[in-house]
Amino acid sequence: MAAKPMTGMRWYLLALTFGLLAIADHFWLPLSRIADQRLGDVALQLNSARRPVSDRIVVIDIDQRSLEEMNDLAGSWPWPRSVHGELIEHIARQKPRAIGFDILFNEADVYRPDHDAYFARAVAEHPEVWLAMTLNADGDGAPMELVPPEVGAVPLTDPPAQVRIPVMLPLTVAGEPGAMRGGLINFTADSDDVGRHHTLYRDRSQWRFPSLPARIAEDLGRPLPEGQRFLLNWRSGWRHVSYADVYLDSLRARPLLPPDLFRDRIVLVGTSAPGLLDLRLTPLGSEYPGVEILATAMDNLDRGDWLREVGRGPLLPLTLVLVALVCLAFLRNISANRTGIALLGVTLLAVAGHWFALTGGTFIPVFAPLAFGWAAYLAASAIAYLDERAQRLRTFGMFKRFLDPRVVSELIERGEIDWSGNAASREVSVLFTDIRGFTPLSEKVAPEEVVALLNSYFGQQVDVVFRLGGTLDKFMGDAIMAFWGAPVAHPDHARLAVEAALAMSATLESWRREIGALGSELEIGIGIHSGPAVVGFIGSGERLDYTAIGDTVNLASRIEGQTKGIARILVSEATMRAAGEGFGWRDRGEFLVKGREEAVRLFEPLPNKST
């Protein structure tokens, strides 16, 4: 579909509209953020697939099998805290770099306090152990003056006195000094509830609470990203060991698990069992284990390979330029297909650049500018389509008066005719035909019957013109003007005009037989001349007619006037020569016609050469 010429202001307004939408999108209404989120998720998935399983993190998974196999040893979940204490002591023998729990120990076990005490001593004796905390949205919370320093809460500027903050602390180990080491494990969701980032800290009431991965990374001497959160650089998977296997291995005299499974690694204890409800929505799936989100954050901080995220602000100029270029293409009447192909090329280049940057550790949100570019393209294409459709309907409405409507539809569909309002010189063959003897007939019958007869005659003759590809110019009383060679150029326009004249003559005979005695006195004359003529829509703004004008038209009319008493059909020598050898010809001699100083040689066409 080609973008037809339109009022330029329309494209300026379209560019302005999308430009304002892009600015509003950047500052107030994040309309295109979903494009960066959804398409960015696809890129993050593909990027994760190429990254191997981490060799620095081991996940001890409380999976469904652990819940079932530990039932005989520790009872139903939640197990006595001493079980976790024994697990810590077993893992610690292999000298891991850190042990982090993605499990909350915020409530004391009033029925088994000795088990809690065992767990608290194990945590206190192993400073590489870190426990989970969460910061809730509401609740009374703990008085901050009573929160021990090992929690890691940092006062900001002028925190209020005696403030209570709803932070869930590992109160199970509160009895052991220095055991309440930990950090937040709150799920970080974006605006669409998908977890793509992880927070380094959360602020509340002038107090800052670090996340668990941030505290472990600091303890290991790793630098942290700037800002409050960072974009996770996902991996294809994690090394999992079932909690039951590790615990049972600790009870055996001869362990079955590798003796260096946890050595120099970061161990995270969490759950993937569906019944424990720690499954989250992430780019990698709708039921992604929370412990694996924690593992991703921890691995990123340990390696320093979290994704550096380019803000949406620097991409705003790209959005505006892309929208402007799309509208400029339509303004310059570049076809929608070519514009779309060019935009597709830009899209592929942008996506390739995005992928190259992503594999290098940087996420560039190019999808929002591309979404705006494609939205502008679709809007412009729709406007161009509606304009073209209106133009087609206008063209059809104009040309169906002169051509067979079925032919008009086909020609418009092929793009062979178009309405431009401009006339142009064309090589055509012009035919004039007039009824003779009609005036006496009109005096013998009622006016209604005269109109019916005339309409019947015109209908049959117009069918002949349309059947042979002619263009009906106009009716002039009881005369018809038609021409061939426009609006669609045809090399055989003269031959078609002569064939039409012969067919019109035969039609007259048939029509005269139909009307009986009334047609005995009717006769027609047909004149044809071929040559250049100015063809197009000519007239005023209120009324336009598709017509041909010029000397060729005038001569065809004069030739028709010479037929009386000589032949029913006469054509000029130019038409005879252009029509070719498909007809027989009878030379009727030279004639002087009005408006010509030189005589005109005329010929009568015969159906074939043998006539």
Image (cartoon, rainbow, N blue to C red):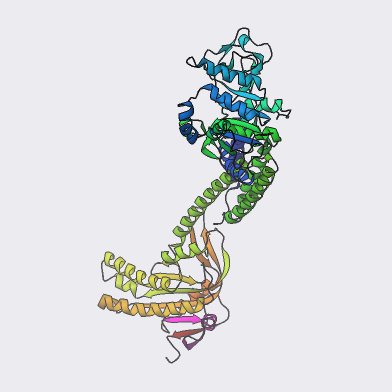
- Quarter of the picture containing the C terminus is bottom left
How far across and down, in percent of the image, does residue 198 sit?
62, 30
Q: Nearer the viewer, residue 56 or 260?
A: 260
Query: 268 or 359, which is in the foreground?
Result: 268
Q: Is residue 409 above or below residue 54?
A: below
Instruction: Report whether residue 74 is seen.
Output: yes
Give the tally of numbered discs. Answer: 0
Q: Quadrant of the N terminus?
A: bottom right
Percent x, y of residue 308: 69, 36
The one of 586 and 258 positioned closer to us in this rendering: 258
User: Magenta stretch?
Assistant: 568-596
589 inside magenta stretch: yes
Residue 227 at x, y percent in the picture: 68, 27
On screen, residue 262 above or below 343: above
Query: For the point 68% across and 30% down, which residue is it?
Result: 97
* Residue 297 to residue 360: above or below: above
**Residue 10 lies in what quarter of the image?**
top right
Please give the name of the residue rendered at 67% of the width and 34% of the height, measured from the top-left corner. Answer: 265
The residue under the point 53% across, 67% down is 549
Would you say residue 256 sits in the magenta stretch?
A: no
Taking the view exactly as shown, the residue that stands out farthest to the front is: 253
Q: Is residue 372 above or below residue 141?
A: below
Quadrant assignment, res 98: top right
369 left or right of 583? right
Identify the residue shown where x is 65% and y is 26%. Answer: 200
